């Protein structure tokens, strides 16, 4: 009797399991990217019907100059998916790796006008428009695809720490006199909302970033 029951269980499991796995995979594949509303980068999945949807964190207003001397602000990036990071041109450590990895993102989406890259200098007293232009030329940066931004130090640091959460929670209590240095890449959607965070020094993370950008494009 026990053997018969065991056989019946195994037969039932063999029929049910594939469908259960298929449904689980389907749900995983269909899950949109989360929102990040706080500096601890806790992911939150919020539906449009949810009351919280209208209160999702967005990047604050900003206005800086890029390597061509053009003013870039929120309106310039409205409706664009973009990757933001913070660097400085004379950085000898993590910045070269980050720039190299962003070059891969540029190559992947070079002909896609809906995807942009935005790198803010954390040493604007060194990185003038001219310096950024030379850096862009050196690294094959497409001026219409990838903005290297400079401006007021306090404004850049405030934006980095309190809007992009660039240094996560440790950055919230710092001021512009404390140097900003972070390896994070921040993925922002067309409405200025944070949808992903990545270690910009790790090439493998770029594959995940590319996948997430494509997911955002599908979501509209």
Image (cartoon, rainbow, N blue to C red):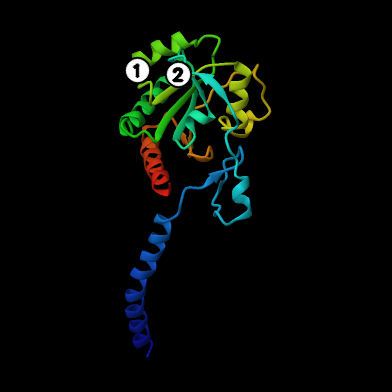
Locate residue 82, reporting x and y percent. Answer: 45, 33
Judge whether residue 184 can be spotted in this image.
no
Locate residue 154, reporting x and y percent. Answer: 63, 19
Which residue is tagged 2? 93
Judge whether residue 77 can be spotted in this image.
yes
Locate residue 105, reporting x and y percent. Answer: 36, 31
Residue at the (34%, 13%) spot, across then down:
138
Outermost bottom residue: 1
- Mark 2 or 1, nearer chain start: 2
Question: The residue tagged with tag 2: helix, strand or loop?
Answer: loop
Report the front residue among 66 and 26. Answer: 66
Is there a contact, CB below 8 Å, between mark 2 and mark 1? no
Please, is residue 23 above or below residue 215 in the view? Answer: below
26 sits left or right of 174 in the view? left
Q: Residues within 10 Å of mark 2 (few under 14, many from 20)?
A: few
Report the front residue among 27 and 66. Answer: 66
Locate residue 31, reporting x and y percent. Answer: 45, 54
**2 vs 1, front mark:** 1
Residue at the (44%, 23%) spot, across then down:
147
Residue 94 is labelled as none
Quarter occupied by the N terminus? bottom left
Image quadrant of residue 40? top right
Q: Give the alpha-carbon distance from disc 2 to disc 1, as whole Å.
A: 16 Å
177 sits left or right of 28 in the view? right
Question: The residue tagged with tag 1: helix, strand or loop?
Answer: loop
Which residue is tagged 1? 139
Q: Residues within 10 Å of mark 1 (few under 14, many from 20)?
A: few
Please, is residue 6 above or below residue 198 in the view? Answer: below
Image quadrant of residue 83? top left
Image quadrant of residue 92? top left
């Amino acid at each position: 009797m026990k053997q018969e029951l065991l056989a019946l269980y195994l037969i039932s499991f063999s029929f049910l399991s594939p469908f259960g796995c298929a449904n689980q995979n389907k749900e995983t594949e269909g899950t949109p990217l989360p929102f990040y509303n706080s500096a601890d980068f806790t992911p939150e999945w919020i539906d449009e019907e949810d009351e919280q949807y209208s209160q999702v964190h967005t990047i604050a207003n900003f206005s800086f100059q890029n390597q061509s001397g053009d003013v870039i602000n929120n309106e310039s990036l409205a409706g664009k998916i973009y990757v933001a990071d913070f660097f400085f041109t004379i950085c000898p450590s993590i910045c070269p790796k980050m720039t190299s990895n962003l070059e891969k993102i540029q190559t992947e989406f070079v002909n896609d006008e809906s995807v942009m890259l935005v790198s803010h200098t954390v040493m604007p007293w060194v990185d003038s428009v001219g310096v950024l232009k030379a850096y862009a030329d050196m690294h094959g940066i497409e001026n219409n695809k990838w903005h290297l931004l400079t401006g007021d130090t306090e404004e850049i640091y405030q934006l980095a720490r309190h809007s992009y959460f660039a240094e996560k929670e440790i950055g919230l209590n710092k001021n512009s006199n404390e140097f900003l240095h972070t390896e994070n890449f921040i993925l922002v959607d067309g409405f200025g909302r944070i949808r992903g965070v990545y270690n910009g020094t790790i090439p493998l993370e770029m594959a995940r970033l590319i996948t997430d950008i494509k997911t955002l494009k599908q979501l509209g």
